[in-house]
Amino acid sequence: MKFLPRVTLLPALALACLLIPMAMAAPKAVRAATPPRAVPVASPYAGATIVVYNETDHDSVELAHFYAERRGIPKEQIIGLKCSKGEEITREEYDRTIAEPLRKTFTANNWWKLREPTDPLGPVESNKIRFVALIRGIPLKIAQAQGYAGDKVTAAGPVGSTNAAAVDSELSILGYRMKVISGAVPNPYFRSFTAIADARHPELMLVCRLDAPSADIVKRMINDSLAAEENGLTGIAYVDARNIKEAGYLEGDTWLYALANSARRHGTPVVLDNGPGLFPESYPMTQASLYFGWYAEHMSGPFVRPDFRFARGAVAVHIHSFSAATLRDPLHHWVGPLLASGAAATFGNVYEPYLSLTPQLDVFHDRLRAGFTFAESGYMAQRALSWMTTFVGDPLYRPFKGAAELEEKPTSGEWADFREAGSAWFSADRTKGDEDLRALAKKDHSGMIMEGLGLLQLSVNDRDAALASFAQAREYYGKGDDSMRVAIHEIIQLEGSNRDADAKNLAQKMIASSPHSPAVDLLRSLTESRAPAAPAAVQTANSAKH
């Protein structure tokens, strides 16, 4: 592998894609449940993983051994460092307390074999370690440095002159040993479709962190990842696009639309919000196994309700310039609050990344569904290294098995039935695909299967068929938040068909049946203020309100 110098990536595009923070009201507190203990599950990557903790932080020590035990990682690959407990450190602190001690440890343990930093074959000849798990207590980000010896601006503009970075991203190229710290480094693994063990990139390590607002949440993340691997990750994918037309921002929506299509084809029910706002706080977002959206400074919407919880093992990501500015606060920004709300894995930015240097959500989702680990999927989606992204979750987490493995879990029941038939719906005759899903819904008495069918029908603009499917889904669901959500789908489509009276009657019926549901306010607002109809292929609460 030829050594890749530090350069500025796509500076014109990066400047055009500057993400501007949006002021939002502070969300309500989110409670984190105490996680149960998990059965240890040895990973095939255990021997290629190190666990790095802060010796001065008691929780960090305990969590490191907790994680290593459950993943079967050898004790000699649990590494303690004496470093700051703070989330932000200086470049000098990073070099002295993190980078240099780790380099010495790698050399002493013969984990890697190095060449000269400028060797045309690359700086690292071989490396046993492919995954690095940073444990809560290890600093999160490196502040901008002035007058760093050997540094220089790599290109005009803020990207080329920035030397601040996420600790994780900087450690991914630990073997590069660069003096030039400004700008970003091209990621040789970007858009790969090869396991890191076979990728022939010894200079790259996949660094994630097990971090969150509390140590208990970190333990729960570990346990939930193991449970999802054992039992399967099931639930609905909620995708929050913005229906944006502005050239500098269009890329973000493009990722989300491609991700939604991919999830549908993998047999996951997809609720796509294509309005300019986010899912409203009162929206009944239940059974959420996947969430991808943008763009607000602090977590908002259904996630801020104290009763909201993600499905066990959920992966949830919200793009914002400073979504991971801190991981310790369960109320501010996105990464910490999403984890406090039950997500097992996420990622975000510690400083301004610019949209073009943000992990591409569609690539990340595609690789995750193909059976790659969380770390592999994240780095395959990341164009730049030595930059602003932190991946937060178990690096070895594999929520999906992929086509090369045995059948996805669960292997029976309504989620398995929808996964198989929902995926086949795209290749089968539409009439037969609809019939098969209706038959499975009847067999399982499944509101989810009928809701999923209705969402598929909307994706191809068959509004009338979708309305019939949603009505049947409500009957199967009975009372509750799932039924209220389906009614919201129906009301939006009824209004889109200029059937305002039918929409209002349905809203009144649902309010009467569940008068204490948080969704009551949303149902009222949808029918009290008539707005332009949502596109037929979109299921959204916001597009009917804005």
Image: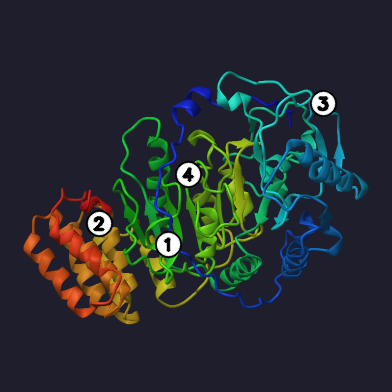
The percent position of residue 151, horizontal first and vertical second, equals 73, 24
Residue that numbered label 3 is attached to: 119
Residue 8 appears in view: no
Q: Mark 2 against mark 1, which lies toward the viewer? A: 1
The 10 Å Cα crowd at callout 1, few under 14, some 14 to 19, many 20 or more, is many
4 and 1 marks in contact (CB < 8 Å): no
User: Marks 2 and 1, Cα distance to the nearest angstrom?
Assistant: 25 Å
Q: Position of residue 299 (x, y in %)?
A: 45, 54
Which amino acid is tagged 3?
Asp
For marks 3 and 2, give the CA distance: 55 Å
The mark that comes first in sequence, 2 or 1, is: 1
Q: Say what amino acid the circle numbered 4 marks.
A: His
- Left/right placement of residue 357 relative to residue 116 reads left
Q: Secondary structure at mark 2?
A: helix
| Residue closer to the observer: 387 or 331 | 331
Foreground: disc 1 or disc 3 = 1
Rendered image quadrant of residue 302? bottom left
Crowd rating for badge 2 (residues with CA inside 10 Å; few <14, some 14–19, many 20+): many
